[in-house]
Amino acid sequence: MSLLPDFVRNVGAFVVVLGVLVFIHELGHYLAARWRGVYVETFSIGFGRAVLHWTDRVGTVWKLSWIPLGGYVKLHGHERPEDAPAETRAAWQRGRTFFEKSVASRAIVVAAGPIANFLLAAVLFAALFMTAGRPESLPVLGEVMADSAAARAGLLAHDRVVAIDGAKVEHFEDLQRIIAANPDRTVQVELQRDGHDLSLPVLTGSRTSAGRQIGLLGVKGEQAEYHRLGPVAAIGAGFLQTWDVTAQTVHGVWEMLSGVRGADELSGPLGIAQLSGQVALLGIASLLSFIAVLSVNLGLINLFPIPILDGGHLVFFMLEALRGRPLPARVQEYGFRAGFAVLAGLFVFATWNDLAHLGLFHWVRG
C-alpha cells in the first residue's frame, strides 16, 4: 500500500524539479533572444496540448502543456529561407528573425540556456550558504574501523589530521585524496589529540577499482559543520561551489569514457525521479541543493558538442564563422540525425540502468 504514496511523491517532486530546471533554461534563451532583437513566438513548459496558455503584450504565447518532460522556446524564423515553405517566409517579420542575426547574436541566444542553468545553481548555493550555512568537512576522524590500517597505526576517533607526508590537510576530502593516491605505502600522519601534537607512521591498505589500486585508511569523518555566510561571501562561495560541481561532473564523465568508472552509474529520468522523491523527504534545503546540482548537470550536458543540443549548434556557428558561410544543409541534417541517434541511445541505456537499479529485472527473474 505504501508504493502508491511513494510513486506520487516521486512523480510530484520530479515534476517540480524538472519544471524549475527547464523553465530557467528556456528563460535564458528567451531573454537573450529579446536582447538580440529576435521575436519569440512560443515559450512552452512541457509538450503536447496546452493546459494553460496566454499571450503577452509583445505577442509571445506562453504555454503550460500536459506532458511535463521538457520545454522549448520557438524563435521566429529559426529556419533558413531555403528550408522554409513560401507561406512561412511570407509571414516572417523582417529584422526579427533568428536566421537574419549575426553569428555572434545567434550564439548568444543558444548559449544563454546553459548559462542560465549555471547561474541558477550559483544563486541556489548562495541562498543556502546564507540561510542553512555552508558545510565544512573538517579532517576529524569520526569513526575508526576495526582491523583497519588506521586502527593498526593507533589512530583514534576525534583525532584531527593536520598533515600527511608534509601535505597540509584542511578538509576531510584532502585526507581521502592523499590516502587514495598512496596504496600500500607508509605515510607520516601529523595529528592533534586532546590538545597534543602527534606524528604516527601509517601503513595504508588498498583495494582495486577499475583496474587500479586505491589507498585505504578505514576511517569515517565526523558530521559536517555548517557556517552561515554574509551576502557577499555567499555569492562568491555559490559561484565557487558551482565551479567545483562542474569540475567534478566533467571528471566523472571522463572517468566513464576512459573506463575508470563504470557506466552503470549513469541515471535517466526514472532514477532522477526516484532520487527527487527521496531528497524531498529531507527538507527544502536538501531539495534546493539537489536542484542546483542537477542544474549544473543540465547546463553542462547541453554544452556537449552533440548536434541537436545547444553545444552542437554552437559548433555549427563556430564553423560558420570560420568558413564565412553556413555549413551545407545536408551536412547539418546528417549531423542532427547522428546527434539524435546518440541521445536516443544514451536515453535507452540510462533507462536500462534505472530499471536495473529499481530491481525490475531481479523481480522478473524471481
Image (cartoon, rainbow, N blue to C red):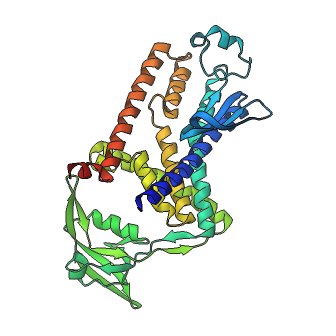
**For the view shown, which residue lies furthest in the top direction?**
86
**Residue 113, position as x, y percentages in the image:** 59, 39
Answer with the quarter of the image where residue 321 lies.
Answer: top right
Q: Is residue 42 above or below residue 19?
A: above
Residue 223 shows up from this direction: yes
Front one among 117 and 276: 276
**Residue 29, position as x, y percentages in the image:** 63, 36
Labels in figure, total? 0
Front one among 122 and 69: 69
Answer with the quarter of the image where residue 340 lies.
Answer: top left
Q: Is residue 233 above or below residue 101?
A: below
**For the view shown, which residue lies furthest in the front direction?**
1
**Residue 18, position as x, y percentages in the image:** 54, 47
> Is 108 positioned to the left or the right of 344 in the image?
right
- Residue drawn at point x = 54 percent, y = 51 percent: 17
- Residue drawn at point x = 24 percent, y = 48 percent: 364
Q: Is residue 103 above or below residue 280?
A: above
> Is 284 positioned to the left or the right of 349 in the image?
right
Residue 244 shows up from this direction: no
